Image (cartoon, rainbow, N blue to C red):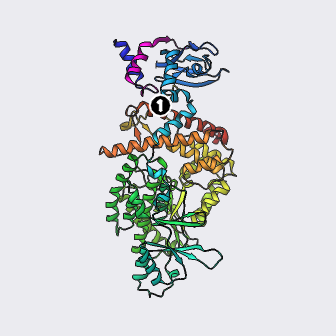
Amino acid sequence: MQAELIEIRNHLSQHEPFEDLAPETLDKIAGRVDVAYYRAGSTITEFGQTATDLHYIRSGAVEIFRRSGELYNRLSEGDIFGQFGLMMGKTVRFPAKALEDTLIYCIPADLFQELWETDEIFADFVEIEDRTRLRTAVARKGKSGDLLTDKVTRLISRPTVSAPDTIRLQEAARIMTDEGVSALLLMDESGPTPVMSGIVTDRDLRTRAVTEALPSETPIRDIMSTGLITIRSEAFIFEAMLMMLHNNVHHLPVVHGEEPRGIIGLSDIIRYESQSTLFVVSNIHRQQDVRGLKAVSKDVRDSFVRMVNEDANSKMIGSAMAGIGRSFCQRLLELAEEKLGPPPVPYCFMALGSMARDEQLVVTDQDNALVLDDAFEPAEHDGYFQEMAKFVSDGLAACGYTYCTGDIMATNTKWRQPLKVWKAYFTDWIENPQAEALLNSNIFFDLEGIHGETRYTDELKALVAAKAQKSQRFLALMARNALNRTPPLGFFRTFVMEQDGKQNDTINLKRRGTAPLSDLIRIHSLACGSRAQNSFERLRAVADTKLLPEGSVENLRDALEFIAIVRIRHQALAIEAGKEPDNNVRPEDLSPFERRSLKDAFQVLSNGQKFLRYRYHAPTGRQLQ
């Protein structure tokens, strides 16, 4: 093969949809290609003319227009155009013009037709427009293991073992022994239909009965756990895993409607789940000091890498890592209470940012606060909570959660306040918004109570949901701040690299990708009065409204998933290579598929930010003066 044809073949093989074609097919294409050169500003195709070729950009840049003359897209090296005209009547649908001096490989219509009819991957690619190509990329990247596709009923090995909640301790222990179960579901049979009232486990018998030497005639109601957390029979195993992580429970009754179908336990999922995330959480809660927790923290990255290698999606990985982070916080708070004694007034430890959103990864800092009961008296009580906050913060740092550089931690007196003060904070931020103040307090609009009186944070979320949607200036200023971080796309759909020393020629996928996406999704969620915290759940809430144009929610979801999963896999590869993980990727380290799909995802973000400015009339810096 001539050197020129080899060069054409090799270049085609680096870009979709040619990268997956057989070598002999690439040779055939290279042998049929005509090379055309267009000077900047010259017309390549005109609307309505006969479509004769599929155009592949070897170098340069091309603008694609609608028939009205409106700019439709900008394409660069490796992109194709003209396929829609070839597939629909053999006439040009989208005129094209060279934006700069451009070299194009022209693939004849008959060869395009042959590829379209005989190669499924090629056909799928050329039939999908830009707005749906990213969805295909997410589906291609998002192959998942059984955890994501198998229902919880798969783990049920026997019918539910239950008993009336009126029985005595000894009778409950006998039933559990005879049936060989570690959990007994207790039923309230006082009404016309029995209803679930509680559960008792082996652990309850050990810690609440045997340890305290309770008599055998003790009513089982005295030691059973109430406020049952259940899971639907149609739920997936990964949902059960996340529910256990989030609530720190070891047994979940599976229900169909109101009827119990069985009980699944922590051990069932650990046996089923190769990532063993729940094993890490279980191990955290067994530790007796910070040294033990620090030792367990070494398992977190292994768990993260195993989940990535099992093709879990970003929502599952983020939720699992956040669940592990919450468990470290919960155990440190328990150890703090053992050291300092009972708290002088009730409190709630509040997670902020990625932990609250269930979007935490292995490169993270700590963002938290304390919401105290309104009976809190600083002179009398703050010494206790100051020591508690320091103990927890230092413990988290020892376990790999670095201190917050912005001092958004419970160690800061400002973020260790009674509920009424927190309500005043949020009310002031929303009703009297100032751009700079909102920039610094943005993180507080991702909040979740993870220990103590979590109803306090429920009240704060309710307050935010009620007030935020009514304050257009608040939403406008939040939108204005969200536009500060733009996607790394240049005018010609080329990547704009970081230029800050050691991270030169990289893209920060958090700062320029997932973070601005989370920002704009949060604003839409606040505007529709949702209390959801997770970005994907927020999008689901927004989808129930007419807030965004048709298709926008799906595009934002796909963009967030793809950027997040590329970021996640970049971190996992660094860990496997013995390097310190970060958020900075080099485009040359990505496959052509990933580079193209990232551009599509960043374009979705760019379009989302344009709509954000339009929808909320986001002011510019000059308008704020």
Q: Which image quadrant for residue 505? A: top left
Above or below, 140 relative to 463: above
Asked whether residue 378 appears in the rendered view, the answer is yes
Q: On the image, numbered disc 1 is attached to which residue?
A: 596
Above or below, 254 relative to 317: below
Above or below, 473 relative to 495: below
Q: Amino acid at mark 1?
A: Arg
Residue at left 43%, top 50%? 361
Viewer-proximal residue among 378 and 520:
520
Estimate how packed mark 1 is, as few (under 14), some (14 to 19) or many (20 or more) residues with alpha carbons within 10 Å. many
Above or below, 297 relative to 539: below
Q: Which image quadrant for residue 141? A: top left
Q: Which image quadrant for residue 625? A: top right
User: Circle 1 — which element?
Assistant: helix
| Residue 542 percent location from the top left of the image | 63, 47
Task: Count how many numbered circles sit on residues in the image.
Answer: 1
Residue 26, magenta (yes or no): yes
Asked whether residue 601 appears in the rendered view, the answer is no
Residue 457, magenta (yes or no): no
Residue at left 67%, top 56%? 467
| Residue 600 percent location from the top left of the image | 52, 33
Viewer-proximal residue among 232 and 620:
232
Residue range of the region highlighted in magenta in the rendering? 17-40
Side (left or right) of 429 relative to 282 = right
Viewer-proximal residue among 511 and 318:
318
